Amino acid sequence: MMSAPFFFYLLGFVSILRGNRLAALCLWWLASLFVLALFAVHASSVLHITL
Amino acid sequence: MTQARLIWLNLLGLLAICAVLLFAFADQIIYGDIPCPLCILQRAGFIAAGTGLALNLGFGIRPSHYATMILGALVVAGVATRQILLHIVPGTGAYGNPFLGLHFYTWSFIVSVLIISGGAILLAYDRQFVVSDPLRSPAASRCWQWAPSGADLSRKWRFDGPALRRRTLPRRSDTLHALAIVWEHPRQHGLPGKSVLEARHTQFLNQCS
């Protein structure tokens, strides 16, 4: 799960090198959503323990 | 500041982010400093910020690319702040080896603030956004008020070469290519007949000469 955003970022860089801007931006958003989701999981678990 | 200099600044920023990531990997592999989940998320944020700079280098400088960079740096700042707050209470210890007196998550927060500041400063130069696409630049729009900004023109420009070669005015080959597309299919682009196009072409040549 933690490696998913890196995989999508890698695909995004490949898209940049291939000249496909739309695919690069879409993959960037997908990877960033994964990052935010993982951070949300961390924050929610911390909140659960704290509360 | 010229656009070429800004391109070089973007390249330097991308190299700096690569250096940060390589340093983290070197510390992990050489000294066995295994990254925690928050450290991994910070690395992902750095890659997100670097993607914005790479987009600038690959497709020309655009505000949306700077926004990508700043959003990635904000993710880094948020995660780093969270990790700093985890260890800020005395007696709770720290994670990893310190570097120059500060831990990596503190350095990560400092670098993310630098990236955000740098992005804001780079965004302040308005002239860099003028000529990222010659067919949509002010000079081109003066000459090509009737030209379509359709997928055919964008596709042509996309394969026209790396963005490191920026120009201040549309090249003759670009304008002639756009003219050829419109000339062959005027009806598809909702344009007037060829006689009107001929007159506008003459006007265009007069403006550009």
Image: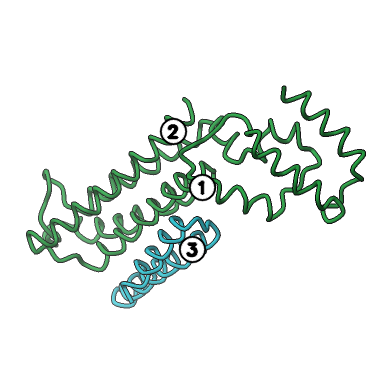
| Figure coloring | by chain
Place of residue A2 in the rendered image (x, y in percent of width and height, measured from the top left) = 31, 73
Residue designated by label 1: B59
The relative height of residue B6 versus residue B188 in the rendered view (above or below) is: above
Q: Amino acid at mark 1?
A: Phe
Chain B drawn in what color? green
Disc 3 and disc 2 in contact, CB within 8 angstroms: no
Residue designated by label 3: A29
In the rendered structure, the residue with mark 1 lies on which chain?
B
Q: CA distance from mark 1 to mark 2?
A: 14 Å
The mark found on residue B6 in the picture is 2
Nearer mark to the viewer, of 3 and 2? 2
Are there few (<14), some (14-19), or many (20+) residues within 10 Å of tag 3? some
The relative height of residue A2 versus residue B172 in the rendered view (above or below) is: below
Q: Amino acid at mark 3?
A: Trp
Instruction: Classify mark 1: helix, strand or loop.
Output: helix
Displayed quadrant of residue B174: top right
Place of residue B165 in the rendered image (x, y in percent of width and height, measured from the top left) = 49, 37
The chain whose colour is cyan is A
Q: Are marks 1 and 3 on the same chain?
A: no
Q: CA distance from mark 3 to mark 2?
A: 25 Å
Disc 1 and disc 3 in contact, CB within 8 angstroms: no
Are there few (<14), some (14-19), or many (20+) residues within 10 Å of tag 1? many
Are there few (<14), some (14-19), or many (20+) residues within 10 Å of tag 2? some
Instruction: Classify mark 3: helix, strand or loop.
Output: helix
